[in-house]
Image: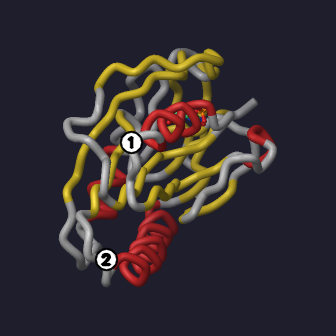
Amino acid sequence: MITKRTYFGKEFETFIDEIEIREMVKVLAEQINNDYADKKEEIVIVSILDGSFIFVADLVRRLRFDHKLDFVKIKSYEGTKSRGKVEHLLELSASTEGKHILVVEDIIDTGLTIDAFIGKIKGQKPVSLKVCALFSKPEVHNDIIPIDYLGREIPPCFIIGYGLDINGEGRHLKDIYQLVT
Ligand code: 5GP
């Protein structure tokens, strides 16, 4: 059954339900558990705020290895559009040198946000640097962004729910909704 919601005069309808999202998170956590179980160095999971806060909370509770969680806040979107530039609003609380870094992003659209962040920490000599994203729009970033752990690809639509917002609204929705065009 399709459910509809309206925010700021824009109509959204259900696209991916919470059961499918839970399954995606479970599969991602299993892949990450397999790859990180035997690491000797410190593991830091970096959540890119704001959109990934629900995803990362669900993901880390399925991880069976010890790790630290850190947060950065990077802004690139205004309303339903990428602004084409990024702003770093909150920086990492510790250096990444000598650590395994797993960056957790809600969605990769143009790839600008993840690219800017990765470029920034690559120079700090982490032991490894990987990316986990719940959603990716390959038609927008032309598949140029390497994603080590991906939930699923979606077409170039605008979505909200499960942490993703439109001007601060809609983050609490359990399902993912897409903008009806
Ligand atoms: P990028 O820099 O890859 O173009 O965009 C990444 C960021 O833009 C995401 O972390 C997210 O905050 C926001 N974003 C990209 N696509 C969407 C979308 O479809 N819906 C929402 N709500 N935010 C998006």
Horizontal side, residue 165 vs residue 4: left or right: left
Up the image or down, 73 lies above or below 108; here it is above
Which residue type carries mark 2? Lys
Image location of residue 126, percent across then percent down: 38, 53
Horizontal side, residue 82 vs residue 18: left or right: right
Up the image or down, 163 lies above or below 35; here it is above
Determine the image quadrant of residue 62: bottom left
Residue 145 makes an appearance in the image: yes
Q: Earlier in the sequence, mark 1 or mark 2?
A: 2
Figure colour scheme: secondary structure
Which residue type carries mark 1? Gln
Looking at the rendered image, the quarter that the C terminus falls into is top right
| Residue of label 2 | 39
Determine the image quadrant of residue 26: bottom left
| Residue of label 1 | 124
Up the image or down, 29 lies above or below 113; here it is below
Residue at (42, 27) in percent of width and height? 74
Image location of residue 141, percent across then percent down: 74, 40
Residue at (40, 49) in percent of width and height? 125
Horizontal side, residue 26 vs residue 135: left or right: left
Q: Nearer the viewer, mark 1 or mark 2?
A: 1
Q: Pointer 1 and pointer 2: residues touching (CB < 8 Å)?
A: no
Image location of residue 159, percent across then percent down: 58, 39
Indicate the quadrant of ligand 1 in the picture.
top right
Taking depth in this image into account, of 92 and 4 the one nearest to the observer is 92
* Residues at marks 1 and 2, CA–CA distance in whole angstroms: 19 Å
Residue at (23, 67) in percent of width and height? 61
Instruction: Assess disc 1: are there few (<14), some (14-19) or many (≥20) residues with their C-alpha within 10 Å of its C-alpha.
Output: few
Local SS, label 2: loop
Residue at (41, 84) in percent of width and height? 34
Looking at the rendered image, the quarter that the N terminus falls into is bottom right
